[in-house]
Image (spheres, rainbow, N blue to C red):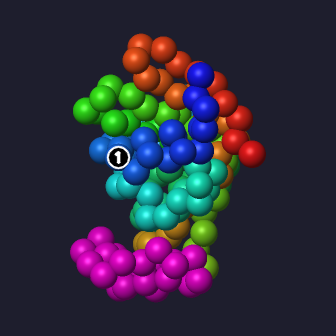
Amino acid sequence: MMRDPEQTIGKLIDKSNLTIISYMDDGGFPVSRAMLAPREREGIKVFWFTTNTSSRKISCYKKNPKASVYFVDKRFFRGVCLTGTMEILETREAKERIWREGDTMYYKEGVTDPDYCVLRFTAERGRYYSNFSSQDFDIL
């Protein structure tokens, strides 16, 4: 039993070397994609990612915002799956908030590139995997 899920899960996320997000496609099937680590996190509840507006996941999230994010620490064979909702943010404020120097490698027109958007994931619950066992938890 985790004594402090926020601390245990937060440390795992910070050490994670693989992040996978999932969404439901038009046929109702789950699709998973590897992502760059979140640009920001607010505890273990809110996570901010960058992505291409033209990507398939954007059209799918617009139809069904239910999502999961899985963080993996391969070194210690542990992970956490968070389930919740994904928002697509295209405001200048959201884009500027997580923009980093070097992002023009992906978004040639800079922070105003129409193919650059922000995903904000809000977790509702999670499942922690470690030492060949798992534990469910709610996120307040």
Q: From the viewer's perspective, is residue 93 above or below residue 132?
A: below
Tag 1: amino acid: Lys
Q: Dividing the image into 4 quarters, which one contains the C terminus?
A: top right
Residue labelled with disc 1:
15
How far from the left and from the top, in percent, is residue 89?
60, 69
Q: Is residue 93 magenta?
A: yes
Mark yes or no: residue 66 visible. Answer: no
Left or right: 13, with 88 as reference point: left
Image quadrant of residue 74?
top left
Query: Residue at the location (44% across, 46% down)?
Result: 11
Give the magenta part as a residue range: 92-114
Q: Which residue is nearer to you in this view: 124 or 95? A: 124
Residue, far right: 140
Q: From the viewer's perspective, is residue 104 above or below residue 18?
A: below
Q: From the viewer's perspective, is residue 65 above or below residue 131?
A: below
Q: Secondary structure beneath disc 1?
A: helix
How far from the left and from the top, in percent, is residue 136?
63, 25
Q: From the viewer's perspective, is residue 18 above or below residue 86?
A: above
Q: Is residue 102 magenta?
A: yes
Image quadrant of residue 127?
top right
Classed neighbour count for the residue bearing mark 1: other residues with Cα under 10 Å, few (<14), some (14–19), many (≥20): some
How far from the left and from the top, in percent, is residue 68?
56, 39
